[in-house]
């Protein structure tokens, strides 16, 4: 699970087998991925983007460019996100589905970049629409008959 740039990192691990292979693992090692407010198919307009992702490395740094068959994924975005364009999640979800992957793309109307991660704060989760719908994410739910870290469905 990741949020923002953390989502970018976990999405790269989940979609680009070379990162798992570097540690002696395979994509079968993953049970699922949860991405909150992340970049999957385009870079943000953050003024610090050159510091985070130098231009020379960008062609090797988008999860959508590495899509293979993957573990189930939950991609969650707030429609009012000003840091990461919420529309960049759709092409990645579509590419994953085209490979036969289980993907749920959840859009939360009116929520911004930080609102999604607030659902995991015990002091805020009951007031967050994401928190109220996240039942099953860390409950050890079964998905397609397999034990999964994420149910990839809301309740």
Image (cartoon, rainbow, N blue to C red):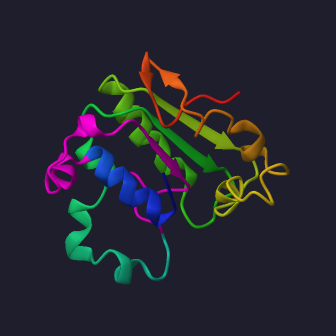
Q: Position of residue 5 (x, y in %)?
A: 45, 65
Residue 149 relative to residue 108: left or right = left
- Report the residue at 48% width, 51% height from top: 1
Q: Is residue 134 above or below residue 88?
A: above
| Total numbered labels | 0
Of residue 109 and residue 155, the one placed in the foreground of this image is: 155
Q: Position of residue 65 (x, y in %)?
A: 25, 48
Q: Residue furthest top?
A: 145
Of residue 41 and residue 26, the one placed in the foreground of this image is: 26
Residue stretch in magenta:
16-44
Rendered-image quadrant of the C terminus: top right
Q: Can you see residue 42?
A: no
Q: Position of residue 68 (x, y in %)?
A: 24, 36
Is residue 42 one of those drawn in magenta?
yes
Picture quarter containing residue 27?
top left
Of residue 64 and residue 8, the one placed in the foreground of this image is: 8
């Amino acid at each position: 699970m990741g949020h923002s740039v953390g989502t970018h990192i976990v999405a790269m691990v989940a979609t680009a087998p070379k990162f798992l292979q570097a540690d002696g693992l395979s994509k079968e090692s993953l049970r699922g991925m949860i991405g909150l407010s992340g970049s999957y198919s385009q870079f943000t307009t953050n003024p610090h983007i050159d510091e985070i992702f130098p231009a020379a490395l960008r062609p090797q740094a988008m999860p959508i460019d590495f899509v293979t068959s993957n573990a189930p994924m939950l991609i969650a975005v707030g429609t009012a996100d000003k840091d990461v364009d919420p529309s960049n999640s759709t092409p990645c979800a579509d590419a994953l589905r085209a490979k036969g992957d289980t993907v749920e793309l959840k859009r939360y109307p009116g929520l911004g970049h930080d609102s999604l991660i607030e659902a995991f704060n015990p002091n805020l989760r009951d007031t967050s629409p994401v928190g109220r719908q996240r039942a099953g994410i860390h409950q050890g739910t079964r998905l397609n008959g397999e034990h999964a870290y994420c149910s990839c469905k809301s309740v």
